[in-house]
Amino acid sequence: MRALAEIQVIPIGVGVSVRREVIRAHDIIRKTGLTTELHAYGTNVEGDLDTILHAVKAVHETLHAGGTTRLTTALKIGTRTDKESRLQDKLFDPLSS
Amino acid sequence: MRALAEIQVIPIGVGVSVRREVIRAHDIIRKTGLTTELHAYGTNVEGDLDTILHAVKAVHETLHAGGTTRLTTALKIGTRTDKESRLQDKLFDPLSS
Amino acid sequence: MRALAEIQVIPIGVGVSVRREVIRAHDIIRKTGLTTELHAYGTNVEGDLDTILHAVKAVHETLHAGGTTRLTTALKIGTRTDKESRLQDKLFDPLSS
Amino acid sequence: MRALAEIQVIPIGVGVSVRREVIRAHDIIRKTGLTTELHAYGTNVEGDLDTILHAVKAVHETLHAGGTTRLTTALKIGTRTDKESRLQDKLFDPLSS
């Protein structure tokens, strides 16, 4: 099943800066082959739901293996049966609204 | 990997009342055998991360098969390596704080 | 405007355990007079939207004043015009579903 | 207090397409003068926390006044005391990671 998702990974206990872990998480997601769009509050992805869920699991496993003790991920998943979801279709020109 | 999670399913396009779909989603999650706690903003679960992710996928598949055209799920996932996470350990007596 | 909400406060950089800050946040919310329900992934509240938003601001201000360097809050807000929202109305008996 | 935030507005009961309401919400947020970045899962904003919270309230009030019966908003708020948060500072070049 095709899905859009937003993945935000928050490492807890690594200090005030979480940049190293966030970059690592984005890198893991990107290497799955999913279409990705990075923004200030997470990584938006487009692709197969199984791949998306597997990517989230891989992020937790890899960051824990790298020494991060605690992780919380906020994930939003969107699916629909009436048309194929695309990240770009969710955007619009705000200046024309 | 053991995890805690919160699963909130929002059907879009079924009307102002979403109760039927929300009950169905909770039922699917509960039948996986995960420990569940229902609250006003979702179902908290405790158990294996694979089972949790599989439950989320099953909710999307089952509700779409039942006629819901569009679904968005908000999922929070917590994992840690220093101790076993339990839903009950995250609670405390607010009156004693 | 009456609203339901879920408030989850995540202190970043205080260490792996965030319990002290989470208890403090819940306490601040509870003292606003809003109806509150604590669960493993946050505090659900029912009441006036202004009071809810003010509580969120007070949590950030108070925890920062107490030494927490970085905070992220996940907030869900629900409003509707067809009937008065109540936390208890969002629940149902899962065993009867 | 300066803050970063992500605001995602989900109208419930308006049908499968929610584009009209989402555009309206983004427009309300943009007109507050906050720095905004639109993406597929919401609008990221940078600015004063009071202005951000006021914008969220204005979205609910304006969309309800325009006929939307039910709204749920997912809001993430980030504040920190060690440096000034900027949306652009949260980004990085994923190809260089």
Image (spheres, coloured by chain):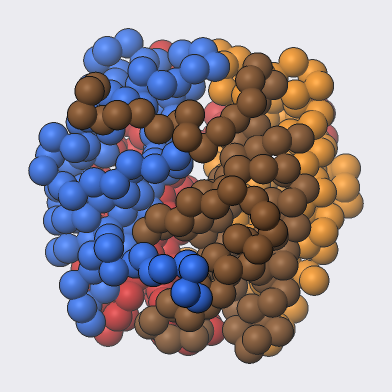
Chain colours: A orange, B brown, C blue, D red
Asked if residue D1 shows in the view, the reply is: no
The residue sitting at 54% across, 52% down in the picture is B36
Give the image location of residue A30, x and y in percent.
82, 44
Q: How many marks?
A: 0
Of A85 and A13, which appears nearest the observer? A13
Q: Left or right: where does residue B4 sit relative to residue B48?
A: left
Q: Left or right: where does residue D72 sit relative to residue C33?
A: right
Picture quarter containing residue C63? top left
Give the image location of residue A53, x and y in percent.
76, 52
The residue sitting at 55% across, 29% down in the picture is D89
Picture quarter containing residue C57? top left
Asked if residue C56 shows in the view, the reply is: yes
The residue sitting at 72% across, 74% down in the picture is B61
Of C39 and A6, which appears nearest the observer? C39
- Above or below B84: residue B24: below
Q: Tell me the quadrant of the picture where the C terminus of chain D can be found.
A: top right
The residue lying furthest to the front in this view is C95
- Above or below B74: residue D68: below
Q: Left or right: where does residue B2 sit relative to residue B6?
A: right
The residue sitting at 44% across, 39% down in the picture is C40
- Above or below C28: residue C40: below
Q: Tell me the quadrant of the picture where the N terminus of chain D can be found.
A: top left
Give the image location of residue D92, x and y in percent.
68, 31
Give the image location of residue D26, x and y in percent.
41, 63
